């Protein structure tokens, strides 16, 4: 058992000497407790709990340590600026050009030029996917708060043959000056605290008969569609269930892990009609023994190694409601997975789980 004395002490800005004085022991004793060399006598636990203002279960790692790590603020540009390269890799990693081409040409089958409005367009990723597939004369407009992303998008589109415009503005504040045939957003609403408000704003940007198209994921579907060679049922080795962590994130307004599946209901609540949904058929295989998958493997490793959950270790999960033992289980699994990727016998299967949900006004 690893006690959380060091974490609680640091969280309260105390030195080992200050804690030792309060406990009436030597600072060397505190150091030994924190490093697991010695364990405090059970009679010390109530006093430690009193000093730190927590229950003894928190000290023992049986209860989550509150406010250990700040939750991510997705509605500001700080997080996205910090993780720009990861987000670019993540979008490319999940996207399936073949399936998207099928949707545009066979399912939606647009024959007339479209005016598209993209909420939270970033560096114009979705526009670059749409425009080559649409009838000549179509236009693309993107809204993005981050000025650097907007500059990157403009530079990319200025060298293209497509009509385009970019608006640097908070999407909550945006007021359309004209109407559009298609309003869309990719991987946006799961990170927004007021998704219904945004959907109503998007709907207001549509011409009569226009279509709202939203793309997002359900991480629980991804989890059900995940398997690696580390899992051995006969030995009781299975991937941990991360749903409790994701539920914590929902209740604390960090992100909504089920957004992809919730979108049809949200569209109905906002008055959209003819609501339909599709799920990408993309299944990502990590196989280092396959030389033709080198690019996929490298992207898989890069995305995995840079994910917040992997970088944050047990602290990440304890900040999201897990006790120490459960957080250690989560972090240990992620670490073993990363090590497993170095094995030539490794094989990981990951379902992308992107929902394409659309309706008309």
Image (tube, rainbow, N blue to C red):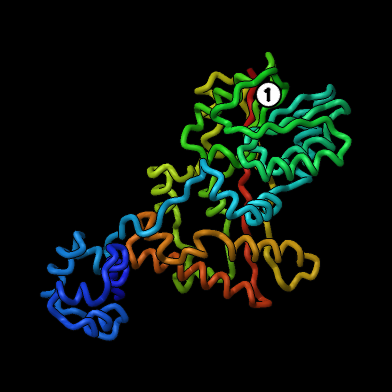
Image location (x, y in percent) of residue 211: 68, 23
Foreground residue among 293 and 132 = 132
- Crowding at dot 1, Cα within 10 Å, few <14 / some 14-19 / many 20+, comes out as many
Q: Looking at the picture, does residue 78 appear above or below residue 42?
A: above
Foreground residue among 281 and 150 = 150
Q: Which residue is drawn at 27% across and 64% down?
A: 62
Q: Looking at the picture, does residue 158 appear above or below residue 304?
A: above
Q: Residue at x 58, y 54 (%)?
A: 82
Foreground residue among 153 and 249 = 153
| Quadrant assignment, res 50 | bottom left
Residue 277 in view: no
Image location (x, y in percent) of residue 117: 70, 28
Image location (x, y in percent) of residue 208: 68, 13
Q: Identify the image quadrant of the N terminus.
A: bottom left
Foreground residue among 24 and 308 = 24
In the rendered structure, the answer to whether residue 182 lies left or right of residue 226 reads: right
| Quadrant assignment, res 318 | bottom left
Q: Residue at x 69, y 16 (%)?
A: 207
Q: Looking at the picture, does residue 169 appear above or below residue 19?
A: above
Q: Mark 1 points at which residue?
A: 211
Regarding mark 1 in the picture, which secondary structure is present there?
Answer: strand
Q: Identify the image quadrant of the C terminus.
A: top right
Residue 295 in view: yes
In the rendered structure, the answer to whether residue 286 lies left or right of residue 271 reads: right
Q: Which residue is drawn at 21% across and 73% down?
A: 18
Image location (x, y in percent) of residue 253: 42, 42
């Amino acid at each position: 058992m690893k006690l959380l004395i060091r974490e609680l002490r640091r969280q309260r800005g105390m030195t080992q000497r200050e804690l030792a004085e309060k406990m009436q022991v030597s600072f060397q004793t505190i150091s030994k407790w924190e490093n697991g060399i010695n364990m405090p006598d059970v009679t010390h636990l109530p006093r430690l709990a009193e000093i730190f203002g927590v229950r003894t279960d928190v000290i023992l790692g049986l209860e989550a340590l509150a406010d250990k790590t700040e939750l991510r603020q997705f509605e500001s540009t700080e997080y996205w600026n910090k993780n720009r390269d990861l987000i670019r890799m993540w979008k490319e990693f999940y996207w399936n050009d073949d399936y998207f081409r099928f949707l545009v040409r066979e399912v939606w089958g647009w024959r007339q030029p479209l005016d598209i409005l993209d909420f939270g367009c970033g560096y114009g990723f979705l526009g670059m996917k749409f425009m080559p597939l649409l009838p000549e004369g179509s236009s693309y407009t993107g809204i993005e708060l981050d000025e650097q992303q907007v500059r990157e998008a403009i530079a990319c589109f200025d060298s293209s043959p497509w009509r385009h415009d970019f608006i640097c503005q908070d999407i909550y504040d945006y007021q359309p000056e004209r109407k559009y045939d298609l309003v869309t957003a990719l991987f946006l609403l799961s990170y927004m605290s007021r998704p219904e408000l945004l959907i109503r704003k998007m709907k207001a940007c549509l011409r009569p008969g226009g279509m709202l198209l939203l793309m997002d994921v359900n991480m629980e579907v991804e989890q059900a569609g995940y398997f690696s060679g580390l899992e051995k049922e006969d030995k009781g080795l299975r991937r941990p269930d991360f749903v409790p962590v994701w539920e914590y994130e929902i209740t604390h307004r960090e992100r909504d892990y089920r957004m992809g599946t919730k979108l049809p209901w949200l569209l109905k609540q906002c008055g959209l009609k003819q609501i339909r949904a599709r799920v990408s058929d993309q299944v990502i295989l990590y196989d280092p023994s396959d030389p033709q998958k080198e690019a996929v493997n490298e992207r898989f490793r890069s995305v995995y190694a840079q994910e917040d959950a992997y970088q944050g270790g047990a602290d990440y999960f304890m900040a999201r409601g897990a006790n120490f033992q459960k957080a250690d289980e989560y972090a240990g699994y992620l670490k073993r997975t990363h090590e497993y990727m170095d094995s030539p016998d490794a094989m990981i299967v990951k379902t992308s789980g992107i929902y394409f949900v659309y309706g008309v006004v």
